[in-house]
Image (cartoon, grey):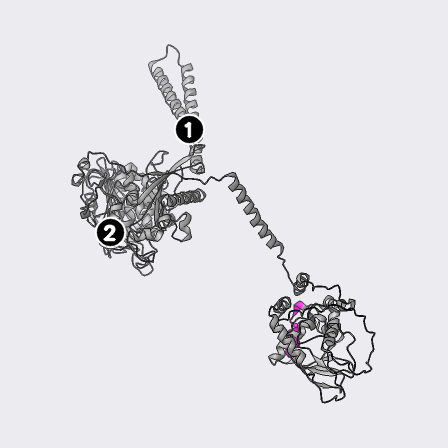
Amino acid sequence: MAQYSGLSRAQLTFDYLHTNSTTHEFLFGALAELVDNARDAGATKIHVYTVPKREVRGGYLLCFLDDGEGMDPGEAASVIQFGKSSKRAVDSQMIGQYGNGLKSGSMRIGKDFILFTKKRNTKSIVFLSRTFHQEEKIEEVIVPLPSWDMDTNRPIAKSAKQQEKYLTEIDIITKYSPFKSEKEIHEQFDKIDGESGTLVIIYHMMLLDNGEPELDVTTNSVDILMANVDKEDDSVPPEKRSFRAYTAVLYIEPRMKIYINGSKVCTRRLASCLYKPKMYKYSSNRFKTRSEKEAAKAYHEAQMAEEKARDAESKARDLQNKVGPVAPKDQRVALRQAQAQAEMLRNDADIKKEVAETKKRSLKEPKVLNFVFGMNIEQRKLDGMFIYNCSRLIRMYECVGPQTEGGVNCSGVLGFVDVPYLVLEPTHNKQNFADAKEYRHLLRAMGEYLNQYWKDIGIVQQGVTKFWENFGYLSTNWKDDPSEDPKFKRKRAMQLPLTIQCDQCLKWRTLPFSASNINKEFPETWNCTMNPDTQRNRCSAAEVKQNIPQGFLKKETKTAEEKSQKLLDDIARKSKELEKLQHVKTVTSRQQVNTLVRSTRPEPAKSPATSISARKSVSKPTPRLDLPPPVRQAAMRRPSQDTSAQQRRASIEERAPPQRTKSTPSSHRRDSIEASPQRQATKTSPVKRQSSAPTPTSTRADSSRRETKATPPPPKAKPPSPKPEPKTYPAKKLPPRPLPKEPAVLQVQRKVRVRKKSLQRRGGQAPLLLLQRYQRLKRRKRSWRSWRTGYLKMGHLRMGWMKTRKILERRLKLRLTGTGTVERLLPPAQKVQVQSDGRSSSTSIQGTSMTNGTA
């Protein structure tokens, strides 16, 4: 480490070299940094080529050779200072602004680079190698910077210490670079034609996981390709897989010839590649971040200049007071120098103050941008926006407006805009913009103008499909290429101007249309003398700018009536949404669901002629126990519309003969289990039983039907518990109520329904849900224990097992046996076994309970 104490240092740690290189996620963006440096140096051409070299990692050297201004030893020394740049200026059109592109770009491509440059009879080398730091285990960044005189090839080292430093630098370069002698080093300078230029050589390339270099230089001899991009993936545009295609659109106004492996790149002006281009001027006050930074910087510089001018003026006045009228000559000379210095600093302070005020006033001025849109009829699948900054491509194929929706609306439209530094500032890697908020505002604005352009060209009126078919897009697949039929190729060529750049003066010339130029490959050395246009067939002729028609954004103006109508429509729509939200209620338990259903259930129609006792006996229909609660409630609320089926069912029930049992031959009267009028009206399958006395709670509807049928009066029998008959009143016959689509499986006694409200207060729908769950389990042939265990898991019932059992026995007159059956408690002399379909299978007087084996 001591032997390198006299060498130049970058004042950074070695780890920063790798960290700085990771800013380039897009590998072609790292290569473009070196092309940008050549353009900023005023180069007219740059050669990007590879040299096979098996000794280095990757197997080749990547070289960038330009004919720019080059660098002298002092400028070369500033290269190793990260963040220092002499290109920063408000009105500068240079791309580099951060002093970081060479280091970050080259370190992203490979581990080491060596730079050869010539300027003003001097030639210098800048050697930055991570391999050198790793082998020598050096933490600081050491950069050898040897220089020579161009005429004598002697090192520029006057003192002995400088000579010793030169020898150390040459030893490092010959040891860790591909050039092992001083002679080979000087041979690289000979590759730079002319008196100035720069050659950058990158080696020890970055590799993929499979050991291959990231850049593929063998597949295409005149191109550099991405090695990790799928060739069959149509979603990847050619600019992201081919460096030749990327450099063709890298600059909005190409003024530099680019060669890749000796083949010239055919650069493109996007405006000349579009069908029906239109330009829209956009002005906005939203882009203030960059302007505010510049204004603050100018204000600070003006303050510093003012302080320097005051200090110089104070020194001049003090010296004038000390020097008398008869002062020596040297004092008078010093006084005049001090006064001249003070005057110069005062002028500089006034200029900077004026610049600061101008920038402050410019904050309120709107920034104007030019949006250009056109149809890409050559490749319609390649659409989107190209965003340039100071003529350099930053973002490409950005979808805006309707293009983000993925439909045919605005598809195939290509647009571009050149944004100056004063409006938006790019990031260090020149692949995005620093202010994301203002950049999103720019994209939204381009989306609005894109909609206007789509309306202006009138493709919708013609038909989008028909428009593309006219240019050879006959396939329904949007990503398919156009037809190569000669008539379609001719039609596309007639609609696009043919522009070529002169190889000598670098001016763009537009050639007149000719059928012979279709698919014609022009020579790389094409110049103005080959132009068939006699007015533009010499380099001295001025370049003709492309005439792009200007469009205007037409904002929709609505009358007062239209605005009021739209307001009323919005109010009506909001009112409907609010009304829907008011009917929505959040429930957290089963009990709240039952309460909500009861509150929304419609009340049955009341007749004024109906008896009071009949009206009191009307209750809500019993839920079907064979259906889950939501379906059961829907069946209760859903009336049947098939009236003919109801009438047929009623007539069949009227003609059905009464069933007699073998155990009670003396009993010939048919009766039904006590039920509500609503259940009778729906004509569900009744549960039949034998009784020696009529039911004391018969309804008016049942009595009216018996009178109509002229049924003979039953024999008198002493009821077990006589009750007074309620008074009835005559009423006209009501039409039968609609029946549910499916009959109920189990009917519950009327007194149970009368007490339903009190039962719900105690346990909600717990008993009915219990029966329903038991019926499902019994149908699946599961045991009583599994039913009881399953019931205990029903936490939403909020009642214990014993409490539910008591409710079943006391309220519903049902008893659960140990064998898994349900018994219905009846008077001592009556017992009926009920099946699952609601029909009585047998009648007996031998017990005091009714067994329902299937519930």
Label 1 vs label 2, nearer the camera: 2
Count neighbours of disc 1 (C-alpha within 10 A) and say few if under 14, some if 14 to 19, many if 20 or more: few
Q: Secondary structure at mark 2?
A: helix
Residue 289's place in the image compared with 619, above or below, is above
Asked if residue 538 is among those painted magenta in the image, a careful observer would answer no
Main SS class of the magenta portion in the image: helix
588 to the left or right of 670: left
Whether residue 380 is visible? no
Name the residue: 40% across, 28% down: 355
Three-letter residue code for mark 2: Lys
Residue 705's label in the rendered image is none
Residue 157's place in the image compared with 489, above or below, is above
**Location of the C terminus (image quadrant):** bottom right
In x, y percent, where is residue 816?
71, 79
Count neighbours of disc 2 (C-alpha within 10 A) and say few if under 14, some if 14 to 19, many if 20 or more: some
Asked if residue 786 is among those painted magenta in the image, a careful observer would answer yes
Whether residue 424 is visible? yes
In front: 625, or 142? 625
In x, y percent, where is residue 759?
73, 69
Q: Which residue is mark 1?
A: 358
In front: 745, or 441? 745
In x, y percent, where is residue 745?
65, 76
Dividing the picture into quarters, in which one does residue 820 lie?
bottom right
**What residue range appears in magenta?**
785-796
Upstream in the sequence, badge 1 or badge 2?
1
In x, y percent, where is residue 631?
61, 69
Three-letter residue code for mark 1: Thr
In front: 832, or 403? 832
Q: Which residue is mark 2?
A: 489
In front: 582, or 695? 695
Q: Residue furthest left?
A: 529
